[in-house]
Amino acid sequence: MISVDAYREAVTELLGRAPVTTLPLADAAGLVLAEDVLAGVSLPPFDNSAMDGYAVRASDVAGAPVTLPVADDIPAGRVDVQPLEPGTAQRIMTGAPIPPGADAVVMVEDTDRGTEQVRVSAAATAGDHVRRTGEDVSQGTVALHAGTVLGHAQLGLASAVGLAELKVYRPLSVLVVSTGTELVEAPKPLRHGQIYESNSVMLAAALRELGCRVAVVRSVVDDVEEFRKIIEPKLADADLLVTSGGVSAGAYEVVKDALTGQGVQFRKVAIQPGGPQGCGRWNGVSVVTLPGNPVSVLVSFEAFLRPALLSAMGHTELDRRRVRARLTEAMTSPGGRRQFRRGYYTPTEGQVTGVVGPRGGPGSHLLAAFTQANCLIVLPEDVTEAAEGAEVDVLLL
């Protein structure tokens, strides 16, 4: 068997790095910046007022209360601001340019709000309520670094420094295929021996959460020629094919039968659940094949596919947050395999470690238990028993 870490590395190398594309800001949310962004302008681009009030010379209001003539009115957006003459004030709005000669702004609350002349009741110090040019970002400096995940604040900054589009790592297009003659799509009625298909629904949702573009083919029957006939024409639009089911050692393993010798290598990974895995390239498209049981699909996604996809799309933080926790009950694990068990983690106030208890048994078909979990409990390959109270690694979902 290949180790969990070695197989994860193989999947990550297979996916490589997504191409770089240029997108409008509105389409770049959640993507990763591919190159540094230089500020085209300073922020603020000019000295401006942080408050509604009056632009003054601080020396003119040092003996407050004082009354000054109001020489001008400066709304935000005015571009023809006149210099401030000594012994006068100019009424100014938040964000408006500070007039030459002024060195402070008196808040409107410290005045009588006059328009012809204004009574200033509080002294000011030079610099009061003045936003200086470039105090946030200086023109020509790096505003956003390559590798930044573009959230709403980052996109706002890009726009504020004069950009309308950004170079980002392109979202991967993923074709999701579920296989199995026993699968039926809800809400069709089930016959004895059939089950409702759920793997493609889970995978598509998980992939879209990462920002991937997803197409789905559900419930392909266990027939090699039919599999190839349906899937091959769709590969032209995909960066990655992800299948579920048909990769084990049975007599009707359609994915394994169809792709063996076609560039996809099938492996046994030292993991529970989810041992049967496969990855490679078919017709020039990256392929990752997952087992068919739903919990195996979700654990395989977390252990191998999620970090590889994040890496491919430029992310540097690839792993779920890992914490230590004390078990609320004893657990067992098969030797030589890394076990991932669904669990529920609760932080303990004032303690470094919280507590965690398993949800459901180790069976790879127990999907409902996954909906009650907020973490995966990780038992390493050399652990076969973990006592109640033992500390374990926990991956927070």
Image (spheres, helix red, strand yellow):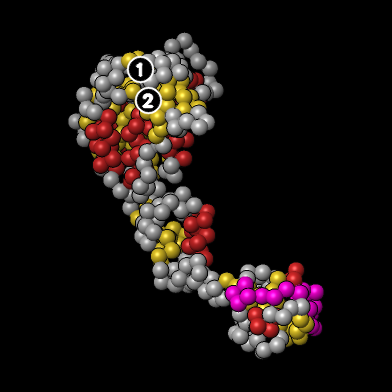
Tell me residue 378's x, y (percent). 36, 25
Residue 182: numbered disc: none
Is residue 253 at least partly visible in the picture? no
Furthest-left residue in view? 261
| Residue at which label 2 appears | 392
Prevalent SS, magenta region: loop
Q: Are marks 2 and 1 in contact (CB under 8 Å)?
A: yes
In this view, 268 is above or below 236: above
Q: Amino acid at mark 2?
A: Val
State which quadrant residue 303 falls in. Answer: top left
Badge 1 local density, few (<14 within 10 Å), some, or many (20+)?
Answer: some
In this view, 106 is above or below 229: below
Q: Residue at x 74, y 78 (%)?
A: 64
In this view, 129 is above or below 8: below
| Residue at which label 1 appears | 386
Q: Residue at x 80, y 83 (%)?
A: 116
Left or right for 8, reference 370: left
Tell me residue 348's x, y (percent). 50, 28
Foreground pick, 391 / 249: 391
Furthest-top residue in view? 192
Q: Residue at x 48, y 57 (%)?
A: 154
Quarter of the figure with the N terminus = top left
Furthest-front residue in view? 63
In this view, 397 is above or below 40: above
Dot 1: what SS?
strand
Foreground pick, 204 / 175: 204
Q: Residues under labels 2 and 1: Cα distance?
A: 8 Å
Left or right for 158, reference 242: right
Q: Amino acid at mark 1?
A: Ala
Mark found first going from the N terminus, 2 or 1: 1
In the image, which residues are magenta?
Answer: 111-128
Whether 195 is among the magenta residues is no
